[in-house]
Amino acid sequence: MLASGASPVEVAAAHPTSSLAWAQLADEAFERGAAVESYAYARTGYHRGLDALRRNGWKGHGPVPWEHEPNRGFLRALHALARAAQAIGEQEEYERCSQFLKDSSPTAAQVLG
């Protein structure tokens, strides 16, 4: 559950740019065995997170520290995307996303892994 106490569906509907809400939706879908649904939610969160990082000056490479709390939605969505990609047989995307997570934040890869 998100810190606000609202459900991830409510947060995503009210704030569709929230990568954290999409990552939480991806986690919930994965936990109930809906890997394709999880993949779709995670991909949305991943892209929303990329958009936010770029708006804040990130150039598409370099660290995305887990320690900076606003990055956690993106990093969680990236982890969820890797996990769901592996579950649906997208091995190349799983490997790419897993490496991107490790390169972006070794701490996130350890915490989420």
Image (cartoon, grey):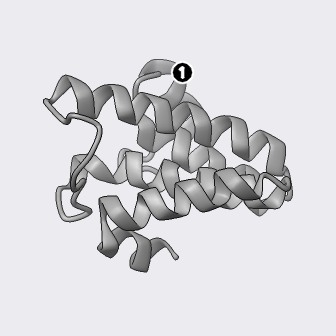
Image quarter for residue 86? bottom right
- Residue at 41% x, 79% y is 110
Image quarter for residue 105? bottom left
Determine whether the residue tagged by mark 1 lies in a helix, strand or loop: helix
> In front: 3, or 99?
99
Q: Is residue 6 visible?
A: no
Residue 65, how many percent across, how many down?
Answer: 21, 60
* Disc 1 target residue: 13
Side (left or right) of 80 relative to 49: right
- Residue at 24% x, 53% y is 64
Q: How many marks?
A: 1
**15 to 59, vertically: above or below:** above
**45 to 77, vertically: above or below:** above
Identify which amino acid the numbered label 1 is placed on. Ala
> In front: 57, or 16?
57
- Neighbour class for label 1 at 10 Å: few (<14), some, many (≥20)? few
Side (left or right) of 80 relative to 59: right
Residue 68, how many percent across, how many down?
Answer: 17, 56
Side (left or right) of 99 relative to 33: left
